[in-house]
Amino acid sequence: MSECHVLLQFGANPFNMRLKDLDGRLACTVVGVGHDPNAIVRLTREAPWAQQHPTIMGPDNSFFYLGPESRPGYIIYGNGRTNIPMTCCIRKKKEGSTSRYFTTLSGKEYKWRKSPTRMECIDARHSTIAIWELSHPDDDHSATLTIKANGMHIVTEILTTLTLNLMAQDLGWMES
């Protein structure tokens, strides 16, 4: 069995939340950073946590630039100049499907298979690389994210697209 990394999500608001590992180390923060003129949200992969995992690659953060009236805008990874439309990161391939597809910066396609209380990130070989699950109401955290070792190299993209799916759900983008 491959090694898994568990992160606990504190805060149910996808625009303002923290994820910590089981040792209490802050792994990721999501916070609003301003308006220009629309809302801008930053996801940061925290260095003290990331330094514990040498297979992590890619940018340390991503920025969500929401469109007018909190409609889908675009994402920028790190200090990059490429704007990735949010709709490209939550694509639906089949009518009636709850799965949402995204393509990583390296060009590989993954999908989030969604249900009301759980999302699974799946690669092209149909292997699950991450699972997000809502927690029990009595827990001190809102949800649990389990990332398998073979997903750690794209952890920022997993965190970004998970957060985008949560934002889309919160804002009602995925009802159609």
Image (cartoon, rainbow, N blue to C red):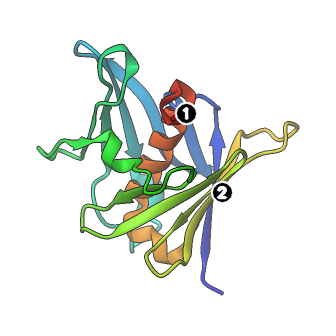
Circle 2 — which element? loop
Circle 1 — which element? helix
Residue at figure coordinates x 38%, y 70% from the top left:
153
Residue at figure coordinates x 47%, y 66% from the top left:
52
Quarter assignment of residue 135 = top right
User: Does residue 76 lie above or below 7 as drawn?
Assistant: above
Badge 1 amino acid: Glu
List the single residue furthest toward the bottom: 1
Residue at figure coordinates x 31%, y 62% from the top left:
104
For the residues bearing labels 1 and 2, Cβ distance under 8 angstroms: no
Badge 2 amino acid: Asp
Q: Earlier in the sequence, mark 1 or mark 2?
A: 2
- Kindly identify which numbered label has been placed on residue 89: none
Density class for disc 2 (Cα within 10 Å; few <14, some 14-19, many ≥20) is few
Left or right relative to 32: residue 115: right
List the single residue furthest toward the left: 81
- Kindly identify which numbered label has been placed on residue 175: 1
